[in-house]
Amino acid sequence: MAEAWTAEALLRDRRLRVTPQRQGVLQLFLTEPGRHWTADQIRSQLLGGMPGLARGTTYKVLEELVRSRICEEIAAPGGISLYGLRLAPHQHFVCSRCRRWFDVEADGLEHVVLVAPPPGAHVVEAAVVFHGLCGPCREAMNAASDAPTSDEETTR
Ligand SMILES: [Zn+2]
Ligand SMILES: [Zn+2]
């Protein structure tokens, strides 16, 4: 990351009160800036340092961070919400095997034209999700399949 943000600096920058819960969530996100977490994953990570952290509180804190645009909420298939940092505009690549979401930069989005918007609709922003296999999953799939690769065929 270009900017070395701290949880406290992020909260102050967005004029949010610094609370241990907000700090805890952001500190967790800052340890792996490109990672997206479910609310339950976040809570179980924080429970060590905050034994009383309720599920409802976790959701409330996440909601506040999303509303102030420090964090993003992704509606993943299956009704799952994923949360992550939103320090810069970005798009997503999702691996169809391990279901991990990666932050990616995409170019040319401003050229996308909505041909027939729903009547009366006003577009606020466009988001693109790229689907495919991540590197480790491609390797695992290749290793699992017995089919010879083109390289092997040429050496026969
Ligand atoms: Zn994968
Ligand atoms: Zn993201």
Image (cartoon, grey):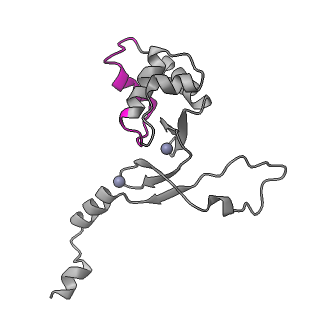
Q: At 36% across and 57% down in the image, what residue appears?
A: 134
**Is 86 on the left-hand or right-hand side of 67?**
left
User: Which residues are the magenta region?
Assistant: 31-52
Q: Relative to 27, does residue 54 appear above or below in the rendering?
A: above
The residue under the point 55% across, 27% down is: 65
> Is residue 109 shown above or below 57?
below
| Magenta segment includes 33 | yes
- The residue furthest left is 156
Where does the N terminus fall, quadrant-wise? Answer: top left
Is 40 part of what is drawn in magenta? Answer: yes
Relative placement, left or right, of 104 versus 68 is left
Image: 118 above or below 155: above
In the displayed structure, 29 sits above or below 35; it is: above
The front one of 49 and 2 is 2
- Residue lying furthest top in this view? 52
Q: In this view, does 66 lie to the left or right of 125?
A: left
Q: How many numbered callouts?
A: 0
The location of residue 23, given as percent across then percent down, is 45, 21
Q: Quadrant of residue 53?
A: top left
47 or 31: which is nearer to us? 31
Residue 41: percent from left, percent from top: 38, 30
Q: Residue at x 74, y 49 (%)?
A: 123
Q: Where is residue 2 in the image (x, y as percent from the top left)?
A: 44, 43
